[in-house]
């Protein structure tokens, strides 16, 4: 079982979670609420886990000289609302009520610009390496907390980055087991699964 996560409504921040606030975010358009949760996969450098590199990417402090891959990556101005590390530790970069810069050019069910109306959650991993039990459990716990805090969000509207940016992005990749994760979410019993068969 997971420990319940709590989001402070006034701030959009998770309680008792490490915060590494990114400068790469802004306000959502007026009147726009979060309606979609996007699951991403990330590793820095590719295929490697641990280290300070994701924090540094999302805060604009990634040295181009630290690794050959970083020469171009260090120029990016990107963020996500939260990261779930391999051991299940959550790091938050952007308050959930604000717009993180995670989706890029994207569409969801005919609606463009997913950053405007979504929450972006990164899982530390790749499409070739299995995600961990701790990550599946914490993702379920985080979705539970988000749906509880934001009535505009629903388990009916959760997508991978590859789904909203097909041909451009592949994450979280084939190693992410959607049905396994949804069964964990249902087993928690606090978030109804309203998907149509």
Image (cartoon, rainbow, N blue to C red):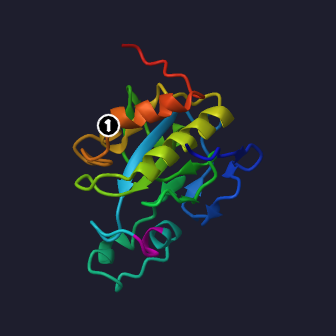
Q: Position of residue 27 (x, y in %)?
A: 63, 48
- Is 166 in front, or is 140? 140
Look at 27% across and 66% down and name the residue there.
47
Look at 64% across and 59% down and name the residue there.
17
Magenta-drawn stretch contains 52: yes
Label count reads 1
Span shown in magenta: 50-54
- Is 34 in front, or is 49? 49
List the residue tagged with mark 1. Answer: 163
Q: Specify whether 56 is left or right of 164.
A: right
Residue that extends furthest to the top in the rendered view of this protein: 197
Q: Secondary structure at mark 1?
A: helix
Figure quadrant of the C terminus: top left
Look at 57% across and 27% down and name the residue there.
189
The answer to whether residue 119 is visible is: yes
Rendered view: 91 above or below 195: below
Q: Residues within 10 Å of mark 1 (few under 14, many from 20)?
A: some
Q: Specify whether 53 is left or right of 69.
A: right
Rendered view: 145 above or below 187: below
Look at 22% across and 54% down and name the residue there.
128
Residue that extends furthest to the front in the rendered view of this protein: 1
* Majority SS type along the magenta span: loop
Q: Position of residue 160 (x, y in %)?
A: 36, 40
Figure quadrant of the N terminus: top right
């Amino acid at each position: 079982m997971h420990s319940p996560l709590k989001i402070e409504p006034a701030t959009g921040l998770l309680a008792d979670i490490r915060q590494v606030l990114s400068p790469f975010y802004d306000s959502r358009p007026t009147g726009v609420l979060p309606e979609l949760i996007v699951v991403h996969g990330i590793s820095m450098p590719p295929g490697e886990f641990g280290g300070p590199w994701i924090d540094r990417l999302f805060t604009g402090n990634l040295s181009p000289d630290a690794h050959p891959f970083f020469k171009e990556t260090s120029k990016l101005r990107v963020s996500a609302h939260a990261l779930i590390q391999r051991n299940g530790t959550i790091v938050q970069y952007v308050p959930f009520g604000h717009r993180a810069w995670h989706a890029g050019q994207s569409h969801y069910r005919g609606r463009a610009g997913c950053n405007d109306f979504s929450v972006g959650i990164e899982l530390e991993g790749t499409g070739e390496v299995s995600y961990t039990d701790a990550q599946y459990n914490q993702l379920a716990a985080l979705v539970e907390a988000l749906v509880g805090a934001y009535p505009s969000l629903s388990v009916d509207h959760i997508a991978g980055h590859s789904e909203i940016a097909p041909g451009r992005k592949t994450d979280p990749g084939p190693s992410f087991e959607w049905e396994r994760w949804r069964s964990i979410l249902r087993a928690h019993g606090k978030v109804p699964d309203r998907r149509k068969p």
